Image (spheres, coloured by chain):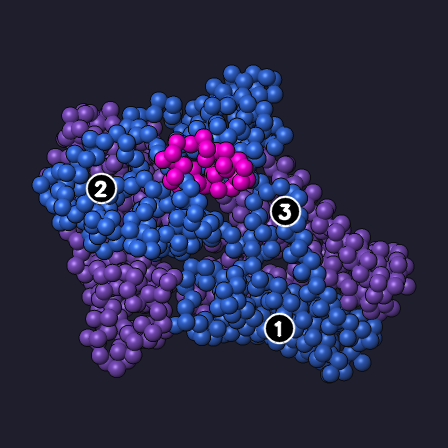
Chain colours: A purple, B blue
């Protein structure tokens, strides 16, 4: 789909020049200067300033612009917003922009891109817009994108680009060089050459550096490596990312159910997924949904509020445990002072274990082979931490209040709740994972409910039993 | 450093065969079979089963083996553990293994690797072991590694490989091909060719695919792209990773302070860093330190316990707020039942905001240009959520207890604490980030202390003021 461009782009300038700070972020002065020009109606100045930027920086500029000023900015820098800029842009900001653009204009942008980037833009559009863009594309491009859209969301089929170099087994290195030099239609965004059999099934792969280092007369089958990591077209993108990571891949062939080569995935698309997937867990664990700062406030409220309401339900369950001991608390209000320490420390310990286990699950480090070892490991840590915290709690409270039985109850509850936290922190996410429920999303509710209930119940219950409260 | 190997490796077999499950993890049956053979003293069977595995899978196998069985496994599969396996291995497991291996053997493994992988293995060794391995290396390899070790830890200098292809400006594509084909010493792990001036400063870069598509007579300066992303040798690896991600790089030139080309960083090394850095925040935010499941229990206890002790201090501060209202609680124990709901909901809301902000900071999405917008955004969300939760709390508690003043106090405290949580959740991490303190490590303590103190104080204080408690 993309035109071959071997000449240096004259539009690109030095990227480390004045617009960026040391962290590759656009400097606030620069952003302000551009927006001032836009506001003053000086589109020409705005255009000139933005023109030297890399597409990724133009995307950043649009993201950093307050939503109400974006339409004016977009109008000023118009043609600088091409397909590359769109594909670098945050999903929410892009959706908003796409709504404002003409389908014909969008089709032009999509046609410049490799299938994977074009699909990323088109897949989020509304049905009608999608159809309008597809109609404006050339038949070839349209067929490619319609096919990509037929694969499930977040699968290798959506992620892959159809542009790739595949050559027959009987070719020599010289044949490949002649083929590559002879055709103007080929993509130049490839990192390996796939060798295929007559049924278009991959039989080997060849890094470009191997070809460059090999004389023309050598047969491709003598240069290629027969073993290669193949990606099934319906594989989930998270699995694809883990596979790239594990085998340090730069690109990989995508095959359909018949084993035929249908596309390739390149690592630059994977890098975004790895970062997203790894960063996502922190947001899920805290119930912040996607947690994207560009998500409209209305949607962020909806996601977070539903999580908070669930947590309110569990907080009420925990509070009802406290409710069972109202007479003890009325008789001895100090219990109400100490009880949040027990529940809170259990919550902290449980969250630690949870974070470790959720991360280990996400990176495929926990398998059937080491599940029990993992549970035992966390219990040992919980026992050590619980004992230490119990000792501190017991001795500290005795020094302050001089009430021996109370201090023993406080210390014992601390130990019990830490063990519950350690056990829950490892068993809950592993169990959810086995049930194919995302442990990052659901674990925290269960674990903090457990530590709250256990914290209140063990402390107040022991206090009631031991007669401290009487 | 690495020998050029253009022929297909006969050791590698089909990776999707019986040993792996659909998530590319070693099957428990396979691990058990290998360990059974090791235990039975049948080293030959163990070796034969492990031999077909990819180095990354051999590393996984060793990680999945219980620590006490590892020495026997290592003895059985001996020579299969090469430098590649070591460089794929978890740091903790590798350190343990390195202690058990002979420096001469390690030097042999290091010599097979590119500088970056060799450095990754050697940098974690103890001084004496490091020296022993360095002494056993060839002078060239030694010099390369000593130089790499002279750069700061986690800098581009440690991450880069010195092996790269650099050619002078006056060469043609044909010259490059002849050079590459003529020398056996060159690495074959490269994805672009750097064009340098006589002072060895990069003047342009050329993707291999461009060279393959260009006739021999064309000058390199006509194929190369002049603009390229250069990595300063002392740049922090996290910044390098963000730069790779932002500009979708496959490899990039590393330059010293004089602008001379000293190495290259390739994306396969970056992928690990992106995953680690993105995953790290969840562990830091929960005070789980590195959170590696292979970290010895003793060290995990130390890290987590010190965080728990800090949290105990803050829990005591919050509890002392409750202590101020003991007489109110003794008079009206229901206050003790409801107060953890107020503090807990604030904690949940604060954690949501914190997760979103920490993630946005880590991905460079928050700059001076949008800080205020971000603070306002979170306050708007907090106001909406606080109002909703306050309404639920007020109405719900009224239906249960029928105590109007109590319900109003409960609802008002909920709103106040949600606003405090939203404000703290965004201001604390951004402030810490400005002070160059890692917001992921320290934010949670401040925010949860704030929400606990504000929760107890607003609820109990309003209850005392309003006379509900009397």
Residue B248: percent from left, percent from top:
32, 52
Residue A20: percent from left, percent from top:
33, 65
For the point 31% across and 72% down, the residue is: A30
Residue B264: percent from left, percent from top:
32, 46
Decide which of B265, A281 is in the foreground and name it: B265
Q: Are marks 1 and 3 on the same chain?
A: yes
Q: Quadrant of residue B337?
A: bottom right
Which quadrant is the C terminus of chain A positioned in?
A: bottom right
Q: CA distance from mark 1 to mark 3?
A: 33 Å
Q: Identify whether B50 is placed above or below B344.
A: above
The chain letter for the residue carrying disc 1 is B
Residues marked 1 and 3 touching at CB (< 8 Å): no
Q: Is residue A43 magenta?
A: no
**Pointer 1 or 3: first along the chain:** 3
Q: Which residues, given as a range, are shown in magenta?
A: B116-144
Is the residue marked by circle 2 packed among few (<14), some (14-19), or many (20+) residues within 10 Å? many
Q: Is residue B224 left or right of residue A469?
A: left
Decide which of B25, B205 is in the foreground and name it: B205
Per the image, the residue denoted by label 2 is: B208
Q: Are marks 2 and 3 on the same chain?
A: yes
Residues marked 2 and 3 touching at CB (< 8 Å): no
The chain letter for the residue carrying disc 3 is B
Q: Mark 1 or mark 3, which is nearer to you?
A: 3
The chain letter for the residue carrying disc 2 is B
Per the image, the residue denoted by label 3 is: B300
- Residue B108 appears in the picture as rendered: yes
**Pointer 1 or 2: first along the chain:** 2
Q: Specify the label residue A228 is tagged with.
A: none
Per the image, the residue denoted by label 1 is: B417
- Residue A2 appears in the picture as rendered: no
Residues marked 1 and 2 touching at CB (< 8 Å): no
């Amino acid at each position: 789909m993309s035109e071959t461009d071997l000449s240096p782009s004259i539009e690109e300038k030095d990227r480390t020049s004045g617009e960026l700070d040391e962290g590759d972020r656009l400097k606030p002065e620069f952003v302000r200067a551009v927006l001032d020009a836009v506001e003053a109606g000086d589109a020409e100045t705005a255009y000139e300033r933005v023109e030297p930027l890399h597409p990724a920086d133009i995307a950043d500029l649009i993201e950093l612009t307050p939503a109400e000023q974006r339409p004016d900015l977009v109008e000023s820098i118009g043609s600088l917003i091409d397909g590359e800029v769109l594909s670098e842009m945050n999903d929410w900001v892009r959706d908003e922009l796409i709504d404002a653009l003409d389908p014909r204009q969008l089709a032009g942008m999509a046609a410049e891109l490799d299938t994977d980037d074009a699909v990323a833009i088109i897949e989020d559009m509304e049905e009608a817009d999608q159809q309008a863009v597809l109609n404006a594309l050339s038949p070839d491009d349209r067929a490619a994108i319609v096919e990509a859209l037929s694969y499930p969301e977040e699968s290798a089929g959506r992620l892959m680009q159809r542009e790739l170099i595949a050559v027959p087994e009987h070719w020599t290195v010289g044949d490949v060089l002649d083929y590559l030099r002879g055709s103007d239609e080929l993509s130049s965004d490839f990192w390996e050459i796939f060798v295929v059999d007559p049924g278009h099934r991959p039989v080997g792969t060849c890094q470009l550096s191997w070809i460059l280092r090999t004389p023309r007369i050598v047969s491709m089958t003598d240069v290629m490596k027969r073993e290669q990591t193949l990606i099934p077209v319906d594989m989930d993108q998270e699995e694809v990312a883990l596979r790239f990571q594990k085998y340090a891949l730069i690109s990989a062939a995508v095959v359909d159910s018949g084993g035929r080569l249908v596309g390739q995935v390149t690592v630059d698309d994977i890098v975004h997924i790895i970062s997203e997937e790894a960063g996502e867990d922190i947001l899920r664990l805290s119930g912040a949904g996607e947690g994207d700062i560009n998500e409209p406030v209305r949607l962020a409220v909806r996601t977070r509020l539903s999580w908070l309401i669930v947590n309110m339900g569990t907080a009420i369950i925990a509070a009802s445990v406290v409710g069972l001991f109202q007479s003890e608390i009325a008789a001895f209000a100090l219990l109400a002072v100490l009880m949040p320490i027990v529940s809170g420390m259990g919550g902290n310990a449980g969250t630690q274990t949870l974070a470790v286990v959720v991360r280990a699950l996400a990176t495929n480090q926990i398998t059937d082979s080491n599940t029990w070892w993992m549970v035992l490991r966390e219990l040992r840590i919980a026992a050590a931490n619980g004992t230490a915290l119990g000792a501190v709690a017991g001795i500290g409270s005795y020094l302050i209040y001089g009430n021996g039985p109370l201090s023993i109850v406080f210390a014992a509850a601390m130990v019990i709740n830490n063990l519950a936290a350690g056990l829950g922190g490892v068993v809950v996410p592993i169990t959810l994972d086995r049930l194919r429920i995302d442990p990052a999303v659901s674990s925290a509710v269960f674990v903090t409910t457990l530590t709250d209930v256990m914290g209140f119940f063990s402390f107040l219950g022991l206090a009631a039993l031991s007669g401290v409260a009487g």
